[in-house]
Image (spheres, helix red, strand yellow):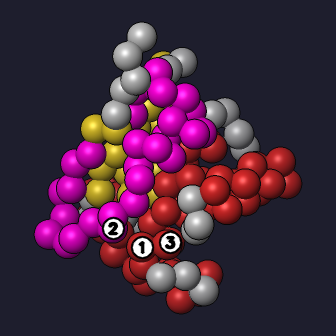
């Protein structure tokens, strides 16, 4: 099976950070994983959160498994920008942090110490 790249879509007017999205995906999920990554604004992020999770707030990131080797991630870069100072991160670094977090969820991980340790390994690998 040929390696699959990340299908990336920017639905915002902002510039996206230059991060190695495909290499990060391959490191966490493997090269055969089919991933769609969309950057969305507050309204769409809130709508998706309400529709699929029943939660009425603007999330920074959402991830959805589509099958054993496929998934999608939605990142709200405006929310990441607002939250970055709270985490001591730059906006670009925050987006990388959120992306790794979502990749770990697609790997089947739930919040907790094991997920945090795994995220730390990948953040270190990609200097985030």
Task: Please say if the residues under marks 3 and 1 sit with CB atoms less than 8 Å apart.
Answer: yes
Instruction: Name the residue located 54 percent from the left edge and 18 percent from the top edge.
Output: 68
Percent position of residue 45, x then y: 35, 58
Give the residue furthest to the left: 13
Q: State whether residue 30 appears in this view.
A: yes
Percent position of residue 121, x then y: 73, 54
Q: Which mark is first along the chain, 2 or 1?
A: 2
Q: Which residue is mark 2?
A: 17
Percent position of residue 102, x then y: 54, 49
* Count of numbered circles in the view: 3
Give the Cα separation between the discs numbered 3 and 1: 5 Å
Q: Which residue is mark 3?
A: 94
Give the Cα separation between the discs numbered 1 and 2: 5 Å
Q: Quadrant of the C terminus?
A: bottom right
Report the magenta residues as a range: 8-36
Q: Quadrant of residue 36?
A: top left
Q: Quadrant of the N terminus?
A: top left
Give the Cα separation between the discs numbered 3 and 2: 10 Å
Q: Residues within 10 Å of mark 3 (few under 14, many from 20)?
A: many
Q: Which mark is first along the chain, 2 or 3?
A: 2
Instruction: Name the residue located 39 percent from the left edge and 60 percent from the top edge.
Output: 19
Percent position of residue 87, x then y: 61, 81
Instruction: Decide whether residue 24 is among the magenta residues.
Output: yes
Q: Which residue is mark 1?
A: 92
Task: Please say if the residues under marks 1 and 2 sit with CB atoms less than 8 Å apart.
Answer: yes
């Amino acid at each position: 099976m040929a390696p699959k790249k990340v299908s990336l879509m920017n639905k915002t007017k902002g510039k996206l950070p230059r991060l190695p999205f495909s290499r990060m995906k391959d490191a966490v999920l493997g090269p055969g994983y089919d991933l769609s990554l969309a950057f969305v604004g507050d309204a769409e992020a809130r709508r998706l959160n309400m529709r699929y999770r029943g939660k009425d707030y603007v999330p920074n990131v959402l991830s959805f498994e589509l099958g054993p080797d496929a998934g999608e991630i939605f990142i709200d870069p405006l929310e990441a920008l607002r939250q970055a100072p709270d985490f001591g991160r730059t906006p670009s670094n925050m987006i990388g942090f959120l992306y790794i977090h979502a990749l770990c969820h697609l790997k089947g991980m739930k919040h907790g110490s094991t997920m945090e340790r795994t995220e730390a390994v990948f953040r270190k690998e990609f200097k985030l």
